[in-house]
Image (spheres, rainbow, N blue to C red):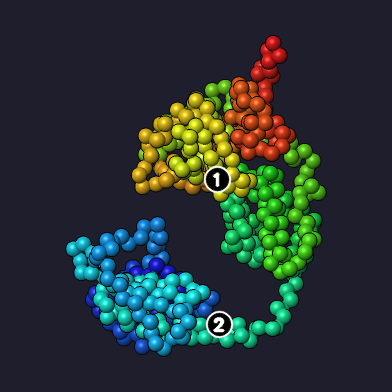
Amino acid sequence: MYSHNPDLLWFQQDCDSGPGHQLKKDGQAAGPGALASAGSAAVRFPGDAAAANPLQIGDTRFDKNRPFKTASSSVRRHILRPSSLPAQGNFMATINERTRTNRPNAWQVSIRVKGEKPIIGTFESKALAEEFVRRVEPPLRKKQAKLAASLKMSEGKPAPRVDFYAEDLEEVLTKFAESSACTLRHRKTLPTVIKSVGRVRICDARTPWVRSYVQRMSKCVTRRKTTFSYETLKVHLAVMKAACVWHAENLGVDDPSLHFHGRKCFPKGWDKGRDRRLEAGEEAALMGAIRSIRKPSRYHWRLLFRLALATGARLQELVLSEWREMVLDDQVWTIPAEHSKTDEARSVTLSTAARRIVRLLRALASAGSERIFHTLGKPDSVSACFHKLTLKAGVQDFRFHDLRHESITRMVLYSEAKFRVIMAMVGHKRESMTMRYTNLRPHELVGVLG
């Protein structure tokens, strides 16, 4: 049996083996007698202790985006409502017969319990599917009864007081990473922060600790053989603060006293800002390195580089972009909030050059993917690959984000758009931020006043 929820079900290996049944352990199939003879079969739920020598039901790499396809006429549904369970609608099991090409029909079980993730499995016969439902029913009923009793006992009792400042910072960050309050940018930074903070309580994470963290991390070598910049470490501290504020709100702690600020911990002049732009010959060198790519993604790489210069968009906004974001005959690109660094949607008017690039991308579109750059990976992997391309091109100390500096500077110099329009297009709320990205060179100022 293949389960779509492998984290929910584990059976002890007190089973016979035989041909035909699709239980799996370490890639090996077990026989139909496995389920029938599992007299000591048990169900493990998240948080329960693992059974000794467990047998996992299911393939942990089930792809929810590729469901089992079947015509409605080829599916017969059988709904089971075991009489031994309470009749409040908190348990329902369905068995569907699925037709398969060149193989006997399969029987898919779907068990839904209120408050739990659905349990789904596929069997070779209806008898095995029904036996599975009978095996799973008692543990589920017991768990539901236990939960109901626990809730009843806790009614009217005050919640135990938790000392917010005595909480472990690493544990708070881990919980925050699993919450819905964690943004895309937080998720990108959290793994490094969780690995680096060590064991420290929130009350001990004061200015001396923050200063030592900054000093220690500024000397750490990253995967790219560089050290963490102070701008990146500022993001680390912002993530720590966001996690602690979120945890304090959950505990009912108002205005927690936190010390995750960098003003006192960073050296003077750390925030002067990066002003790296393309030097003479570097754009051609980078395009030469991109043309040397021999993978199917080579065409997307060329157009990604060009579109970054034409729009000034951030890496994640480009890589995660989808065709639904291109509107008004590809004249406007509407970047959704979930793809933006600031978690705010914005619209980008596409120039003639940008629209030409989008037309070329239309020719490379895939019917099986909504992503525009569907041959490229996630933003992190694209950033790492771009770093390798800069080394191959002989371009030193250049990041993909530096293309944004180059693009905004070109917009200010050569575009007819007003400054406030450029701010809105690139997602800046303050003029000072746009000016920070505008790095004019002396020869570019010659003759601007006539």
**Quarter of the rendering containing residue 136:** bottom left
Judging by the rendered image, the residue that carries numbered circle 1 is 336
* Image height of 189 relative to 349, above or below: below
Q: Residue at x 61, y 36 (%)?
A: 426
Q: Secondary structure at mark 1?
A: loop
**Quarter of the rendering containing residue 97:** bottom left
Q: Which mark is residue 147?
A: 2
Q: Residue 162 appears at what percent x and percent y?
A: 73, 74
Q: Residue at x 73, y 50 (%)?
A: 215
Residue 295 shows in the view:
no
In three-dimensional space, the C-alpha distance between marks 1 and 2, rounded to whole angstroms, equals 40 Å
Residue 123 shows in the view:
yes
How would you rate the neighbour count of disc 2 (Cα within 10 Å): few for under 14, some for 14-19, many for 20 or more? Answer: few
Quarter of the image that includes the C terminus: top right
- The one of 163 and 169 positioned closer to us in this rendering: 163
**Quarter of the rendering containing residue 181:** bottom right
Residue type, numbered disc 2: Leu
Q: Residue at x 68, y 33 (%)?
A: 434
Mark 1 vs 2, N-terminal side? 2
* Image height of 355 relative to 192, above or below: above
Quick check: 21 left or right of 241? left
- The one of 329 and 233 positioned closer to us in this rendering: 329
Q: Residue at x 71, y 69 (%)?
A: 251
Count of number-bearing discs: 2
Q: Residue 220 appears at what percent x and percent y?
A: 65, 49
Q: Residue 334 appears at what percent x and percent y?
A: 53, 40
Q: Secondary structure at mark 2?
A: helix
Residue that protrudes farthest toward the top in the picture: 450
Quick check: 213 left or right of 388? right
Q: Which mark is residue 99?
A: none
